[in-house]
Image (cartoon, rainbow, N blue to C red):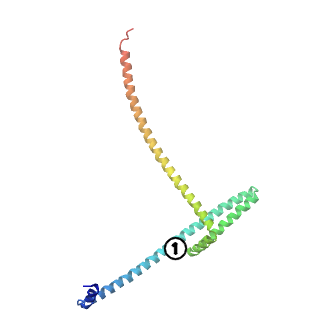
């Protein structure tokens, strides 16, 4: 029997009684479940998006606040330079403080989508700056990791050295006492013997 004959034979056989109703009910249940899953996924996505935006807003406010503090510190440095009559350097530092204040206001006023668009535009206009910034960030991360590894290694080697030194001091003192005790006994026994001349 060929495959064609087998498929025609299957279509010739009448469906079992009630199977179309079961199939229809299963299909409806599946579609209902699929719709509910889609609604729950949409609700979850919306919830996560809102949480992300709230977290971003909090971080954005914190970053803007830190930039304002940094601007204030730079401004104090500029004031000290003015007091020391270093006017040319003070003007550069004043400009830096004003720039930091402007960046802080900009960050505070913009939302996530505005900032993302601005970063994208800047990256398209000046890709070398972005690549250079990423390079510097990579160097900074590498330096922090290396410093963390050195600190960890030095603290563990310091601990190991202290442990070994403590053991070796104990061993030496135990050996010294043992030798000293034997040497003392030899000296005592030799001094108690009469010397023959």
**Residue 115: percent from the left, percent from the top?**
58, 73
Would residue 153 appear left or right of 37 to someone viewing this image?
right
Would residue 2 appear left or right of 37 to someone viewing this image?
left
Q: Nearer the viewer, residue 101 or 18?
A: 18
**Residue 91: percent from the left, percent from the top?**
73, 62
Quadrant including the N terminus: bottom left
Q: Residue at x 27, y 85 (%)?
A: 2
Q: Quadrant of residue 133?
A: bottom right
**Residue 13: percent from the left, percent from the top?**
24, 90
Q: Nearer the viewer, residue 131 or 15?
A: 15
Q: Dot 1 corresponds to which residue?
A: 53
Looking at this rendering, what residue extends furthest in the left direction?
17
Q: Secondary structure at mark 1?
A: helix
Position of residue 185 relative to residue 81, above or below, is above
Q: Residue at x 58, y 66 (%)?
A: 63
Mark 1 closeness class: few <14, some 14–19, many ≥20 residues within 10 Å = some
Position of residue 183 relative to residue 151, above or below, is above
Q: How many marks?
A: 1
Q: Quadrant of residue 168?
A: top left
Q: Nearer the viewer, residue 185 or 128?
A: 128
């Amino acid at each position: 029997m060929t495959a064609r004959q087998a498929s025609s034979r299957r279509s010739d056989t009448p469906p079992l009684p009630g199977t179309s109703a079961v199939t229809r009910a299963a299909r409806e249940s599946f579609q209902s479940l699929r719709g509910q899953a889609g609604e729950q996924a949409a609700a979850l996505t919306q919830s996560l998006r809102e949480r992300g935006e709230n977290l971003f807003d909090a971080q954005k406010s914190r970053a803007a606040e830190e930039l304002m503090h940094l601007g204030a510190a730079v401004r104090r440095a500029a004031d000290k330079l003015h007091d020391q009559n270093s006017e040319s350097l003070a003007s550069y530092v004043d400009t830096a403080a004003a720039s930091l204040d402007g960046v802080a206001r900009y960050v505070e006023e913009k939302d996530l989508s505005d900032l993302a668009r601005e970063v994208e535009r800047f990256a398209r206009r000046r890709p070398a700056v972005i690549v250079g910034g990423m390079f510097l960030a990579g160097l900074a991360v590498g330096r922090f990791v290396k410093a963390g590894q050195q600190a960890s290694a030095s603290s563990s080697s310091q601990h190991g050295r202290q442990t070994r030194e403590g053991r070796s001091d104990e061993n030496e003192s135990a050996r010294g006492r043992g030798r000293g005790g034997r040497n003392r006994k030899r000296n005592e026994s030799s001094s108690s013997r009469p010397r023959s001349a």
